[in-house]
Image (cartoon, rainbow, N blue to C red):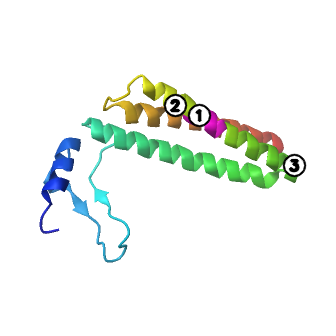
Amino acid sequence: MRYLSPYLFSILTVIGISANTVVLANTQTQPTKTYLAQKLNCNDPQTQSAINICSQLSYQDADKKLNQAYKKLLAKLSKSRQQKLIAAQLAWIKFRDASCEFERSAYEGGSIAPAIYAGCLEEATKQRTQQLREYLQHDG
């Protein structure tokens, strides 16, 4: 990347990323995607931006584990019980998201709001994963 446009530079400055830490992926191999790469230490994030990103990554990891448990359980159930689990899971997702939106609303407009939301999603997702794993033990 030979230069940063003034617009991109101002955005990076606002979110606290210095121009020398920005690396764009080779757009020739994936023209529809641009990646922003930054070394993060999620064991000790130093900025609110890093905390927000690490919180989102942690939630995504929890969501991946939830989906693994869900798929295992679904495969072991009869068709009628599969339908009930699907309905329950859809209702749970709707509840989780609404509940976490409520939790985040206390920080509306604040830079910590994304971390609060992701943390809420992660905690609720971990609880649901445990519940699904318990179902697996009883139904498996």
Q: Position of residue 62 (x, y in %)?
A: 53, 43
Instruction: Inspect the image, locate mark 1, and give the three-letter code of the amino acid beneath it.
Output: Arg
Residue 80 is marked as 3
Label 3 crowd (10 A; few <14 / some 14-19 / many >=20): few
Q: Position of residue 48 (x, y in %)?
A: 28, 35
Q: Of callouts 3 and 2, which one flags the residue occurring earlier in the amino acid sequence?
A: 3
Instruction: Inspect the image, locate mark 2, and give the three-letter code of the amino acid beneath it.
Output: Cys
Query: What secondary structure prevails in the magenta region?
Result: helix
Instruction: Inspect the image, locate mark 3, and give the three-letter code of the amino acid beneath it.
Output: Ser
In the rendered view, does 131 fall on the left or right side of 114?
A: right
Q: Of callouts 1 and 3, which one flags the residue occurring earlier in the amino acid sequence?
A: 3
Q: Residue at x 81, y 48 (%)?
A: 83
Quick one: SS at disc 1?
Answer: helix
Mark 1, residue position: 96
Separation of disc 1 and disc 2 at Cα?
Answer: 6 Å
Quick one: SS at disc 3?
Answer: helix
Mark 2, residue position: 100
User: Does the image show residue 45?
Assistant: no
Farthest residue, direction front: 7
Label 2 near label 1: C-beta < 8 Å?
Answer: yes
